[in-house]
Image: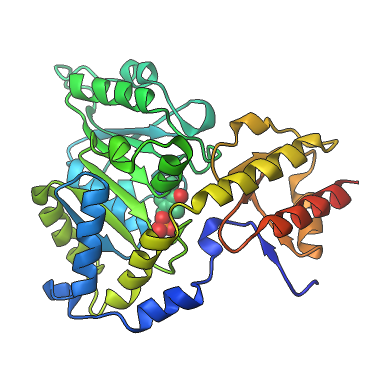
Amino acid sequence: MPDSVINLYSDTQTQPSEEMRKAMAYAEVGDEQRGLDPTVIALEEEVAELLGMEAAVFLPSGSMCNQIAVRLHIRPLGDEMYLHRLAHPITAEAGGAATISGAMIMPLEGEGGMFTADALRDRMRDPSDSHEPRSRLVMVEQTTNLGGGRVWPGEEIDEVLAVAKEFGLRTHLDGARLLNAAVASGRPAAAFSAGFETAWIDFSKGLGAPVGACLAGSSELIAEACRYKQMLGGSMRQAGIVAAGARYGLQHNVERLAEDHANASFLAAGLAELPGVKLDPTTVETNIVIFDVPDAKALDRKLVERGVEMSLLEGRVRAVTHLDVDRAGVEKALAAVEEALG
Ligand SMILES: *Cc1c(COP(=O)(O)O)cnc(C)c1O
């Protein structure tokens, strides 16, 4: 087993840099649960501003942002939520939307983890028919994770939001990688998020921080979110230590996401040339590359032997670029795939 691993398993694999660790070590801290941690407060204000919202709350994870948002919007009265089949609350939150919020879930289909406004409209219920669940919440993932890091165009999101308005739906944006979308498209993060009632960003993905995410919305919704945070055991104490890593990531690691995107494009272009690989490199818009090979499991095994980690997804292979893998690393990964397939 080679000792240096090129880890393209996910952008969650980053190690905090020396400078980030210093910022964390010397952060001013207080009792977060009582609203007395100055670093957490500063972070929450920065994120509210960034997303064009009144308020934000620091949470231990993006999954908790989604779960609290679902709980804010869904009433346990047969309310139905609409999201892509591959969206994180369906695939990776242990069924929490059903358990914690009693949500009816309507998975939508669509290419690249995105659905159209028409696909949403087709699923709307008749509110006067007491047989049917009640249409209540629509969720958009920007960028799409298992959909391949795709950026929903602003106009398409606006069309989805227009349907939501027409049918009185609540709206939530899973912005785990919203800043990747902002950097890739040149559209400010707030231009994507401000039309939603709740939105969040993750610090432990491309921003390179070890822990945390921030959920934003109106002051009223975020005050309510704080109650669920406490209920779920998400309130912390001297959380400024971790919030400082998040603030460092926001200050230093946003613009550089463009490098991850360039590395992913480079990887995709190289992979697409290899015999046996099926991939349209024009669909790679940010830092996620998903491709098909005849035997994904066998490829994954051979890559591990060659010191390269990727992940498997419904029989496909997924590689995610991030700040701990440079161009040379991506070149080595590409060579490893070529050798393994050869
Ligand atoms: C990673 C991710 C989450 C969950 O975030 P955690 O901080 O890992 O809990 C939610 N949604 C999407 C799209 C993600 O990529």
Q: Picture quarter containing residue 278? A: top right
Find the residue positioned furthest to the left.
220
Examine the image and state in which quarter residue 182 appears.
Answer: top left
Q: Where does residue 305 sit, x and y in percent of width and height? A: 81, 64
Answer left or right for 120 relative to 333. left
- The answer, for residue 315, to whether it is visible in the render is no
Identify the residue at the far right of this view.
Answer: 342
Q: Residue at x 26, y 67 (%)?
A: 234
Residue drawn 37% across and 61% down?
A: 251
Identified at 21% across, 52% down, the residue is 48
Q: Is residue 329 left or right of residue 98?
A: right
- In the depicted view, which residue is nearer to us: 130 or 208? 208
Q: Is residue 323 above or below residue 101?
A: below
Which quadrant does the N terminus fall into?
bottom right
Horizontal relation, residue 97 to residue 220: left or right: right
Which residue occupies 28% across, 45% down? 199
Pick the residue in front: 228 or 217. 217
Q: Spot the residue most to the bottom.
A: 26
Estimate the x, y position of residue 39 in percent, counting from the top left.
24, 72
Position of 71 with respect to 277 (left or right) is left
